[in-house]
Image: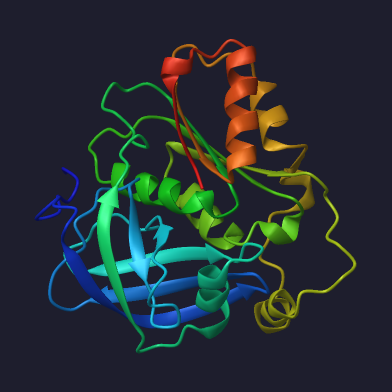
Amino acid sequence: MPSATPPSTDPAVTVTATVVEHHRLRHDLAVIRLECTESMVPFHAGQYVDVTVPQRPDLPRRLSPALPPSMDGKLEFHVRTVPGGWVSGAIVADTRPGDEWAISAPRGGDLHIDDSGRIAIMIAGGTGLAPLRSLILDVARRDNPPRAFLFVGGRTPRDLYAADMLSLLDEALPWLTVVPVVEYVENPDVPDPWHQRILTRIGDIGPDVDDLIEGSLDEVVSSYGAFGDHQVLVCGPAPMVTATVQRLVDSGTPIENIRYDPY
């Protein structure tokens, strides 16, 4: 089955989408789901868009959809606050159902999984998971998805905010293997009230400690050696992307095999 194709790729198009759900998962992170009522946002899985929110109407922010284009106009974004980030902070703390977002200018395109059949190595730091998850769901529509390994990293297990969703994908998609990576296997002593609320309500849905690989993403991924016949995708904070791409190249992965998108 071919991937859904947006009706337009005109970057001048602006679409209004309405917030239908706002899930604050950590003190600094939220998942926001929206619906477009009149037209679809013209993007491809792996691209990013500019969003303008009512809390900061004069400051567009670049975000990557975490779902591929769909005919019912559903959108999802994963947003983490950054130091001094007026927009990201407002989205995480102040977004409410009914808010209207202006979404425009789909850009990028380097992050994609081609039809060569080569194994895909996907490396996500933090909310860099969003576009890679969109790509995974998009590729799942193909008749013969390539084998894929998703390395998803955080500082501690608590930072793996989408562990339950990744576990479901891992079980549902036989061609996908999820590899959780943390720098420290113990969570910090300082509690996160939003994480604690989830634990109280539904229990610990994070990965088993025995399934965690300890280390930084760049060290762990490069320890597998050169990916000479693979397609490699890297997305996350700029320092993590830079370090990971450099280690991959140093360990023998051809730079032309690597597609990356820092934020």
The residue under the point 38% across, 77% down is: 57
Q: Residue 230 falls in which quadrant of the image?
A: top left
User: In the displayed image of the protein, which residue is found farthest to the left?
Assistant: 7
Residue 20 image position (x, y, % from top left): 36, 83
Residue 262 image position (x, y, % from top left): 51, 42
Residue 60 image position (x, y, % from top left): 39, 66
Give whichever of 89, 131 is nearer the camera: 89
Q: Tell me if 133 is positioned left or right of 208 in this view.
A: left
Residue 150 higher or lower than 19, as above or below: above
User: In the displayed image of the protein, which residue is found farthest to the right?
Assistant: 189
Residue 77 higher or lower than 169, as above or below: below
The residue under the point 83% across, 60% down is: 187
Q: How many marks?
A: 0
* Colouring scheme applied when the structure was drawn: rainbow
Quadrant, the N terminus: top left
Residue 151 higher or lower than 90, as above or below: above
Q: Tell me if 97 is positioned left or right of 236 in this view.
A: left
Residue 256 image position (x, y, % from top left): 41, 16
The residue under the point 65% across, 78% down is: 202
Q: Residue 35 falls in which quadrant of the image?
A: bottom left
